[in-house]
Image (spheres, rainbow, N blue to C red):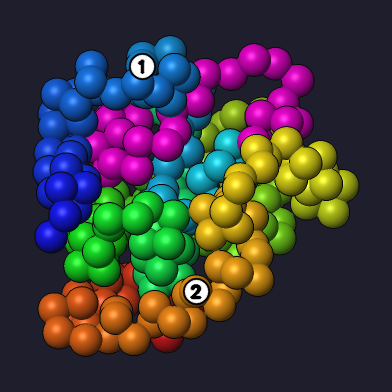
Amino acid sequence: MTVKDIRMRIRSRIGVTYPGFRLLAPMMTLKNGKLTPDTDICIEGYPRSANSFSIRAFTSVQTRDLKIAHHTHLAGQVLGAIKMGIPTIVLIRKPLDAALSLVLREPGVGTVTALSLYLDFYAPLIGVRDRFVLAPFETVISDYGAIIREVNEKFDTDFDLYSNDRDDDVVFSSFPKFKSELVSSLPTDAKQKAKQELKEQFSAGKSGDLLDEVNTLYRQFMPSED
């Protein structure tokens, strides 16, 4: 286990509850991503689950400035938003796809850590599933407007709707350019090839057991995929 593995797992374990998240919050360097009482909406998910896309897409179509809690990747932030009655979107992606992408993006993060972080984020949210809008990765990148419409209906809000057909080009053009295709937020051929090479590592030993566990958890959120 690397030093990065240890740090990420400690942070994740502390942040599974709202009190734990509040302990971590002062140490976070996010400028506009931490939950506050005047937050307008919380949009959170496990890393590599269209977090950056969802935030950029959402803000790109709003006609007013909004305070958005995002990118902590901690269940405690979601639980805090629910506690405060703040509209909340929880992003979700198939476990193996998300974990593969995280390991590629973050050198030093192992397969066991990547899967453990998935459990830490989603397991505490099962009991409050009816208190937020679940946003599957595939829907976010194809019909994000439907997710925002569901938020408006559930929380009696009037957020402006996003159209993937109309707005994707503008949003994608706003992403930073990376020297390596492996760390890009956008799909690349290099990432797909590297993921294929990594898959075997996720099916062996403890990683294999954890993968079974996170797949079971994923199906609790997404029973229609059984």
Under circle 2, the secondary element is helix
Give me the C-alpha separation between circle 2 and circle 1: 39 Å
Relative to 28, is 20 on the left or the right? Answer: left
Q: Which residue appears at 59% of the width and 18% of the height?
A: 66
* Residue 188 drawn at (x, y percent): 65, 65
Q: Which residue appears at 60% of the width and 47% of the height?
A: 179
Q: Which residue appears at 64% of the width and 62% of the height?
A: 187
Q: Which residue appears at 34% of the width and 30% of the height?
A: 81
Tell whether label 1 touches label 2 (CB within 8 Å): no
Q: Residues within 10 Å of mark 2 (few under 14, many from 20)?
A: some
Instruction: Name the image quarter holding residue 17.
Output: top left
Amino acid type at mark 2: Ala
Under circle 1, the secondary element is loop
Which portion, as a residue range, is magenta? 56-84
Between 67 and 184, the residue placed more toward the observer is 184
Q: Which residue is mark 2?
A: 194
Relative to 113, is 191 on the left or the right? Answer: right
Q: In the rendered image, is residue 207 in sight?
A: yes
Q: Residues within 10 Å of mark 1 (few under 14, many from 20)?
A: some
Between 215 and 111, the residue placed more toward the observer is 111
* Residue 38 drawn at (x, y percent): 43, 13
* Residue 20 drawn at (x, y percent): 13, 32
Q: Which mark is residue 36?
A: 1
Between 181 and 62, the residue placed more toward the observer is 181
